[in-house]
Image: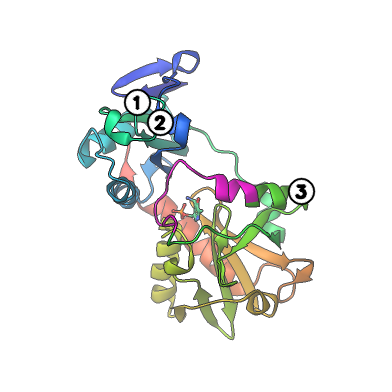
Amino acid sequence: MKIYIDGIFYEEKDAKISVFDHGLLYGDGVFEGIRFYQGKVFRLQEHIDRLFDSARSICLQPPLPKEKIIDAALETIRCNKLNDGYIRLLITRGIGNLGLNPAHCPHPTVIIIADSIQLYPSEIYEKGLKVVTCATRRVSAAALSPMVKSLNYLNNIMAKIEAVQAGAGEGLMLNEQGFVAECTADNVFIIKNGKILTPKVGAGALAGITRAVIFELASNLGIPLQEADITRHEVFVADECFLTGTAAEVISMVELDSRPIGEGVPGPITQRLTHEFRQLTQRTGTTIY
Ligand code: PMP
C-alpha cells in the first residue's frame, strides 16, 4: 500500500510522521473518511468542503488549496490501483514543541490513506443493529463543536468502549440535555407514522454527508423529513430507526437497550432508503481513472 504524506508516496512501513506532530501530541488536526465505489468517489467535493470548514474552525490553514487536495486524493487511489474502497484524509497541525500553542507549528501535514474497507457483515444489514445508550454524553457544542471533524475522537471512543463492552453494534450518545445526538460514528434517524425525524446538528451531531444524502432521497421520494429534539423514549416507540455514515452507509437499528424497535427487523422505509442510497453510490461520483 502506498501512503501520501505531503506530496510523497511512501510504502506502508516507511509512512511515518514526527512524534512532535501535534496531531499525535494533542489530537490537533482534522480528517475525513470518504468512500469510492466502482471507480468513482462519492460526494468528494462535500467531504473536502467539510474538511476545510473543520480546518477553518480550528484556525488550521491547509497547506494546499481544495483542488490540489482533491488531485492528491485521486492520485492516492490510482497509485494503489483501487476501484472500491475508503480514503482517510488527515490534516494534522504539524510539528511543534511540547507546548499547546499551534503558532509553533508552521507546517501542517497532509496524510492520505486509500484502502479497501471492512464493512459490517451483510448479515447485519439484513437483520439490523442492536444498539445501547452510552453513559458518556456527547461533548457540549459550547466546549467543542461536534461539527468539527477533529482528530480528537476520545469522546466517541469512550462511548464506543461502552458499546463494545455491552456487546452492541453501536452506541447511542445523548447530549447534555438528554436528547439524542448521534451514535459514536453515525448519524441517527427515526421514523414514526411515515415521517422521518433526525436530531439537529446543534443537538451534538456531525453534519454527516450521508445524512445530507438522506435529506435529498427523502425529498425525492416524497417522504416528510424533519429535524427535531428526540428522546430515548421516542426511539423506543419509533416504527423504524436507522443510522447513516460513510463507512456504514444506511443501516437499520432494530433494538435499543434490549427493546425491539418497531417489529425488530429492518422496516420498509429504511430498506427503501438503503436501496436508493446504494443506487446513488453506483451512479454518481468523481471519476478516478
Ligand atoms: N457522526 C460521527 C461522530 C462520525 O464520525 C461520522 C462518520 N464520519 C458520522 C456521524 C457520519 O458522517 P458521514 O456520513 O459524513 O460519514
The residue shown at (76%, 71%) is 260
User: Label for residue 22?
Assistant: 2
**Residue matched to label 1:** 96
**Could you say where residue 22 lies in the image, as x and y percent from the top left?**
40, 31
The local secondary structure at tag 3 comes to helix
10 Å neighbourhood of mark 3: few (<14), some, or many (≥20)?
A: few
Residue shown at the point (41%, 22%) measured from the top left = 20
Residue ID at (64%, 52%): 159
| Image coordinates for residue 244, horizontal then vertical, percent | 53, 59
Mark 2 vs mark 3, CA separation in Å: 30 Å
- N-terminal label among 2 and 3: 2
Residue 144 part of the magenta-drawn span = yes
- Which span of residues is magenta-colored? 143-158
Report the residue at 41% width, 62% height from top: 213
Q: CA distance from mark 1 to mark 2?
A: 7 Å
Where is residue 227 drawn, in percent x and y?
Answer: 45, 76
Q: Amino acid at mark 3?
A: Gln
Residue placed most toward the observer, 47 or 178: 178
Asked if residue 161 lies left or right of residue 208, the reply is right
108 drawn magenta: no
Image-quadrant location for residue 287: top left
The three-letter code of the residue at mark 1 reads Gly
Residue situated in front as seen by the camera: 85 or 47: 47
The quadrant holding residue 95 is top left
Q: Amino acid at mark 2?
A: His
Q: Magenta span: helix, strand or loop, mainly? A: loop
Task: Name the residue that disc number 3 marks.
Answer: 165
- Sequence-earlier tag: 1 or 2: 2
101 above or below 154?
Answer: above
